[in-house]
């Protein structure tokens, strides 16, 4: 295990019966970088995320995080080790307020304390400091007492990222954070992610090449359950195989 | 003839009825994502309508054909008028509305036929036993095994070999896709629900001459259907078959060894299967 | 402010019952079933678990106290504690097997286990009295060190004891549902997958909720056995599980005071209607259908909406949770 790499995944496979979703993926993510995973639909990007974060169990391979083997550990344990994720399809607590959503995420790192049947989450137990910080960073101060289900789509996507942030993780896994967003929201999100890249290690699945090319340090291209190419944004953009995989049309974005 | 052979054959007979009960529930769940807690009252209605029909002079054979169609119609109406409106709501309301419907129907049965049970005569031609050398066995029970086996084959053919079956199987994977293919999903739902009701009703009709009718038979049928589905695996046709026969045999054999505990052993068997195979014997993975 | 309303309502009803009803047994029945509904509500309204197995714990509570009081010399308070503990343990057992399963499987399993318990009770008559149940269960006075603190001979005296126990449990559960644990349950109800993804061991939380629910329901069963003097096999029937669930839904899931309203409604309706029309359960079925179609927040929801319409000032927006009309 190298101290340079926060996350090392080796030969990760996932089978659904006879269907091979992942056919042996290697991924190494350097600390404090933004590492993007891109690829056509069906490449297995979200499946890979599920394996890395423990949302689903891998069929084979190994995953090491911060020097520890986490392959067999369920999602809620990996959170404690410093992994946090957002979801491609918005997955919040819809009837709870923004503040409460974030408090739950902040509390989740220390989930054993949540077995407290006696104290209500106020004062010392309210994680208020962390929640306030995240709300400021997300720009959701005005919505803090609104139900998460009532937010606009863009606000929900930001809250999705905020949930991961509240865990004060070592690595944040963002699954298509900008999906469905309009132009105004997009710029805010791009700034937010670039910002995050300074303080955390960010692993990002994205289709928006403008974001990927501009803010990533490393780009891994996946296709049909395997890694096709990996390298700097520039080298990936120029790679023939990548152009073929995307039918040559999509990686033209980015403005430095 | 050995008691154990007798009980095993009995077990297969009961098991086939349990299969019939469970398969309707399983198919409905597969497509509608709906556990129909009113499934038991369709069984109940099947038995009672048969009882009434026979009492009014209809032949058992006619009842066997007509009653399930009638109950299917009841199911169709219930789905169209009531159940359809809760599909979008949280799943507890799917369950609760069917519990409500079940309560209403059960009470209506008691209003009409009283709270005590009654018996249904074995149809003429099937009374008495067959004797093949050492093997002595009631004719009617053999008939039940035959009919349910035939129905199993028929259902299998419908599911695997017809367009309707394909639509049901496809819809179980993805209702959205099915509607995109131009099939009227709502009509499909009603049809499948009615089919589920019909299979439960047939089980009720067939069971009536064996165990009579009584207003609370629906609840026990529901619980057993659940056990079979859990043991066999939700959504699996063969699972319902294997599970049904297994549970039936367990119950029958136990009724010789420990009569009071026979019914209990069904549930113990279920718990045992669950501990070893949480998805049921043949269930699809979670 | 919200929290105090629940307790105020509970207190109000407990005090009002002796003034409005003529039968102490009926009043006790309301509170006893309310306890069972509180247990069911903790599961359904707060954790999102639909359990058809509450009859297991209700019956177990009845049998336990029956056995303790008729066959051992255990003082009544300890016998009650024994019932509570056994209820919790049983819930733990059932929970461990059932909670592993998702959504609908869980519901079906609770029903199957309920049936299992019924047949188990039926097949060990030495412990349960089988078909007849356990008979001649006494209603001992509350005493300590030989001094009688509270006589339970009359129905209203017993009601007073039940009322105190009920209020204690109510306040305790109130504390639990507003605690960090309770708030986590709400998150699990809203979105299990996310709760797990942010660090919570969801099955463990569900199990604890289930154990608490079993304990409270067993307490209700024990009090019930003392009240009627019998621990009947019927207490373990599917019907009991069904009715507890019905009361929970009618009152309104997700609110503790609503549990009391649901039990009150049911017990009074049963008492009044059953003499008028033996098949009154049909109306209950209709009510269930109506609630599923349009009145998901139950009677409590109706009351809240009424207040909102009248005063315009009563806010349903709490610090953590906003009630959405559509779901």
Image (spheres, grey):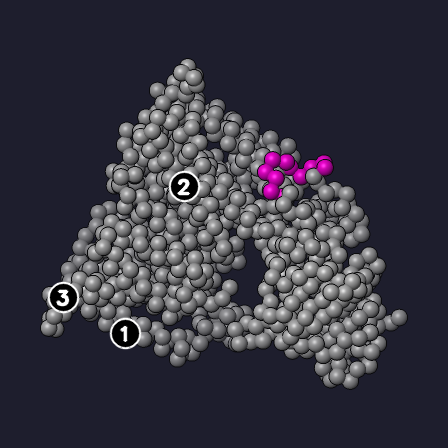
Within 10 Å of disc 1 (Cα), the crowding (few <14, some 14-19, many 20+) is few
Residue depicted at 54% across the width and 51% down the height: C203
Between the residue at mark 1 and the residue at mark 3, the CA separation in whole angstroms equals 27 Å
Residue A135 x %, y %: 77, 49
Which residue is tagged 1?
Answer: B150
Between the residue at mark 1 and the residue at mark 2, the CA separation in whole angstroms equals 43 Å
Q: Which of B28 and A67 is in front in this view?
A: A67
Q: Residue extending furthest top?
A: C147
Mark found first going from the N terminus, 1 or 3: 3
Q: Which of C99 and A245 is in front in this view?
A: C99
Q: In this view, does A197 lie above or below C152?
A: below
Residue depicted at 70% across the width and 40% down the height: A126
Between the residue at mark 2 and the residue at mark 3, the CA separation in whole angstroms equals 44 Å
Q: Nearer the viewer, residue B3 or A156?
A: B3
Q: Is residue C132 above or below residue C8?
A: below
Q: In which quarter of the image is the N terminus of chain B?
A: bottom left
Within 10 Å of disc 3 (Cα), the crowding (few <14, some 14-19, many 20+) is few
Q: Residue B27 lies in what quarter of the image?
A: bottom left
Q: Nearer the viewer, residue C122 or A192?
A: C122
Q: Which of marks 2 and 3 is in front?
A: 3
Residue depicted at 27% across the width and 62% down the height: B249
Please tell me whether residue C104 belongs to the stretch shown in magenta. no
Residue A82 x %, y %: 71, 55
Which residue is tagged 3?
Answer: B1
Q: In this view, does B146 lie to the left or right of C268?
A: left
Which residue is tagged 2?
Answer: C57
Residue depicted at 69% across the width and 63% down the height: A64
Q: Which stretch is magenta?
A: A114-124
């Amino acid at each position: 295990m190298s101290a340079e790499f926060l996350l090392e995944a080796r030969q990760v496979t996932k089978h659904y019966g006879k269907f091979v979703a992942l056919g042996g993926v290697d991924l190494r993510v350097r600390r404090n970088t933004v590492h993007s995973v891109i690829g056509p639909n069906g490449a297995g990007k979200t499946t890979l995320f599920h394996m890395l974060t423990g949302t689903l169990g891998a069929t084979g391979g190994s995953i090491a995080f911060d020097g520890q083997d986490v392959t067999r550990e369920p999602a809620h344990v990996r959170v404690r080790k410093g992994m946090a994720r957002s979801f491609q399809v918005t997955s919040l607590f819809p009837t709870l307020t923004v503040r409460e959503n974030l408090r739950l995420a902040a509390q989740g790192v220390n989930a054993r304390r949540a077995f407290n049947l006696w104290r209500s989450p106020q004062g010392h137990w309210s994680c208020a400091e962390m929640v306030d910080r995240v709300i400021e960073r997300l720009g959701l101060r005005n919505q803090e007492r609104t139900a998460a289900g009532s937010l606009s789509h863009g606000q929900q996507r930001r809250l999705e990222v905020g949930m991961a942030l509240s865990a004060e993780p070592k690595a944040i896994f963002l699954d298509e954070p900008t999906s469905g967003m309009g132009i105004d929201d997009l710029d805010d999100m791009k700034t937010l992610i670039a910002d995050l890249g300074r303080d955390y290690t960010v692993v990002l699945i994205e289709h928006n090449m403008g974001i990927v090319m501009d803010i990533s340090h490393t780009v891994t291209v996946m296709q049909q359950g395997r890694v096709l190419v990996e390298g700097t944004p520039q080298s990936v953009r120029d790679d023939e195989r990548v152009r073929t995989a995307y039918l040559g049309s999509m990686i033209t974005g980015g403005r430095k | 003839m050995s008691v154990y052979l007798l009980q095993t054959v009995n077990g297969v007979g009961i098991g086939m009825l349990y299969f019939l009960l469970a398969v309707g529930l399983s198919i409905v769940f597969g497509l509608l994502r709906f556990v129909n807690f009113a499934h038991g009252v369709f069984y109940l209605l099947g038995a009672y309508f048969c009882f009434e029909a026979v009492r009014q002079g209809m032949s058992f054979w006619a009842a066997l054909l007509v009653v399930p169609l009638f109950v299917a119609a009841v199911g169709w109406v219930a789905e169209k008028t009531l159940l359809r409106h809760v599909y979008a709501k949280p799943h507890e309301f799917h369950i609760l509305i069917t519990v409500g419907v079940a309560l209403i129907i059960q009470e209506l049965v008691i209003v009409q036929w009283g709270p005590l049970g009654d018996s249904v005569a074995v149809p003429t031609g099937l009374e008495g036993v067959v004797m093949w050398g050492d093997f002595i066995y009631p004719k009617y029970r053999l008939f039940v095994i035959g009919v349910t086996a035939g129905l199993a084959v028929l259902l299998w053919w419908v599911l695997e070999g017809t367009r309707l079956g394909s639509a049901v199987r496809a819809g179980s994977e993805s209702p959205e896709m099915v509607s995109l293919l131009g099939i009227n999903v709502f009509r499909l739902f009603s049809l499948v629900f009615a089919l589920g009701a019909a299979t439960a009703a047939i089980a009720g009709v067939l069971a009536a001459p064996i165990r009579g009718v009584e207003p609370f038979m629906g609840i026990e049928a529901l619980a057993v259907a659940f056990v079979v589905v859990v043991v066999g695996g939700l959504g699996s046709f063969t699972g319902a078959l294997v599970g049904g026969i297994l549970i039936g045999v367990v119950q029958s054999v136990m009724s010789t060894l420990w009569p009071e505990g026979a019914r209990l052993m069904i549930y113990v068997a279920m718990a045992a299967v669950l501990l070893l195979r949480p998805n049921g014997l043949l269930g699809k993975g979670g | 402010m919200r929290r105090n309303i629940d307790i105020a309502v509970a207190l109000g009803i407990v005090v009002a019952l002796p003034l409005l009803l003529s039968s102490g047994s009926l009043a006790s029945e309301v509170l006893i079933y309310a306890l069972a509904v509180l247990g069911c509500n903790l599961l359904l309204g707060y954790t999102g678990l639909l359990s058809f197995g509450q009859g297991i714990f209700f019956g177990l509570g009845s049998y336990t106290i029956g056995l303790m009081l008729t066959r051992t010399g255990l003082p009544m308070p300890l016998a009650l504690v024994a019932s509570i503990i056994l209820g919790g343990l049983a819930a733990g057992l059932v929970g461990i097997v059932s909670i592993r399963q998702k959504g609908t499987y869980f519901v079906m399993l609770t029903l199957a286990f309920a049936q299992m318990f019924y047949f188990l009770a039926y097949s060990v008559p030495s412990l349960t009295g089988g078909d007849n149940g356990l008979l001649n269960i006494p209603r001992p006075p509350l005493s300590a060190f030989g001094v009688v603190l509270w006589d339970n001979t009359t129905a209203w005296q017993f009601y007073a004891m039940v009322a105190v126990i009920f209020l204690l449990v109510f306040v305790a559960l109130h504390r639990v549902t507003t605690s960090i644990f309770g708030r986590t349950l709400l998150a699990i109800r809203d979105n299990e997958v996310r709760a797990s993804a942010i660090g919570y061991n969801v099955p463990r939380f569900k199990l604890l909720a289930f154990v608490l629910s079993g304990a409270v329901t067993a307490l209700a069963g024990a009090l019930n056995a003392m009240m009627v003097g019998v621990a009947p096999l019927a207490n373990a029937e599917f019907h009991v599980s069904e009715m507890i669930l019905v009361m929970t839904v009618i009152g309104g899931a997700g609110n503790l005071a609503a549990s009391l309203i649901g039990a009150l409604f049911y017990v009074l309706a049963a008492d009044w209607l059953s003499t008028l029309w033996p098949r009154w359960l049909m109306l209950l079925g209709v009510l269930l259908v109506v609630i599923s179609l349009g009145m998901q927040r139950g009677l409590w929801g109706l009351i809240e909406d009424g207040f909102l319409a009248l005063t315009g000032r009563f806010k349903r927006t709490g610090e953590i949770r906003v009630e959405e009309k559509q779901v």
